[in-house]
Amino acid sequence: MRLRRFWFLTTMVLVITCLACWGQQAGAEKRAEKRKIIIDQDAAGPAGTDQQSILLLIQSPQTEVLGITVVTGDMWLTEEVAHTLRMLELIGRTDIPVVPGAEYPLLRQKEETEQWEQRYGSVAWLGPWTPGRYHPPGELGQMPEGKPTTKPANEDAAHFLVRMVRKHPHEITIYEGGPMTNLALAISIDPEFAGLAKELVFMGGSLNPETTDPEFINTPRHEFNLWFDPEAAHIVLPAPWKKTVCTPVDISVKTRLTSELIDRVKAGNSPAARYIGTYARLRGQYNYLWDELAAAAWLDPSLVTKKEMRYLDVNLDRGAGNGDTLTWTEQEKSTPGLQPAEVQVDLDTQRFYKLFVDLLTAPTPKRN
């Protein structure tokens, strides 16, 4: 009887020990699992808010960047793709696919926009149509960092996006740093696209920013990403995302890229730090960290100290408010089909700047 009891107790101890070890191993694997993300970006360069936000997401050890889909926005598609390919070459991450997307907005045209400006007033930033910067879309433009030798993926952005969320359902964050044309096309191809993603995180929209910046004083609801392709945003924002997080102008204007911040990055010796140290520039009086904040707040949500819930859409009226951000609270909304969004309002700027420097000066993470 004693022998049987001994073997029973011994067996139970072994079972409990094995279960504990299995639990620890499973916990470690869960902690080591990286967060999947696709970066959809109007990837102007070299450096600048677009490339710097891409770098923050690549440099984080907690992320697995499945691809960078590119859309015309701050520059034409062709040069944005080239700048992105070259940046990846310089930091040693050519394993990340760069996927070309939409070259034009769904409906907006240059000539129509010029006529609109004659009637309602000039727009501060027109992306590739900005006077003094305009050139035909097929031209590459200046490449001070050198032309890339690698090639973009042989697939369009919309189909890549759909294929990836089908392959990894409910696992992929879609980060949007530019106009939403690629996402709208993905939804048009596959209406289940938004629901198959884990969440949408985007820089865009403007509510009531507190700023002396003349771009927003008279037009506080105007913001380039949503304005450049309002029809695309009107498709994307009401789509059935499980979660939507918005980094609007209101919180972005509380940040600044400064010479001191560039010098802190330049003091590092990582490939990303050398890239930023060589090509980052201050442009005019206002140098907001637009897209970088959206990326950093996704990596560390505690950077945001205040947020509010709003329902978002875009004004499609052809008048003076075309492309403006529309928002409602829960009590105000009357339009059916709108989706709630977490709108960031305030942040811990010093912690944000520290994360910005820490990530860009860190060693390049290993390839996926």
Image (cartoon, helix red, strand yellow):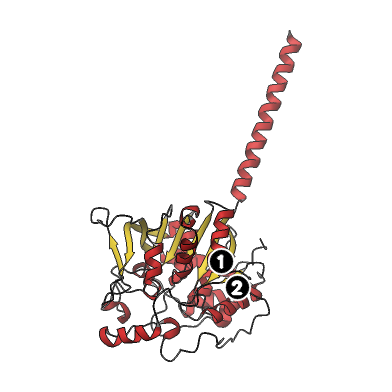
Give me the residue at 29% from left, 63% from top: 327
In the figure, is residue 46 to the left or right of 352? right
Give me the residue at 64% from left, 84% from top: 147
- The image's mark for residue 79 is none
- The image's mark for residue 359 is 1
The quadrant the N terminus occupies is: top right
* Mark 2 surroundings within 10 Å by alpha-carbon count, few (fewer than 14), some (14 through 19), many (20 or more): many
Residue 46 visible here: no
**Mark positioned earlier in the residue sequence (1 or 2):** 2
* Mark 1 surroundings within 10 Å by alpha-carbon count, few (fewer than 14), some (14 through 19), many (20 or more): many
Q: Which amino acid does label 2 sit on?
A: Ala
Give me the residue at 54% from left, 52% from top: 171
Q: Name the residue that disc number 2 marks.
A: 272
Q: Is 318 or 215 nearer to us in this picture?
A: 318
Disc 1 and disc 2: Cα gap in Å? 9 Å
In the figure, is residue 269 to the left or right of 252? right
Residue 191 visible here: yes
Pinpoint residue 16: horizontal percent, then vertical percent: 66, 28
Task: Check the image and name the residue furthest to the front.
Answer: 189
Q: Which amino acid does label 1 sit on?
A: Leu
Marks 1 & 2, CB-CB < 8 Å contact? yes
- On the image, which quarter does residue 230 sit in? bottom left
Pinpoint residue 226: horizontal percent, then vertical percent: 38, 71
Q: In this view, does 224 lie above or below 362?
A: below
Pinpoint residue 293: horizontal percent, then vertical percent: 45, 67
Please tell me whether mark 2 sits on a helix, a strand or a loop. Answer: helix
Please tell me whether mark 1 sits on a helix, a strand or a loop. Answer: helix
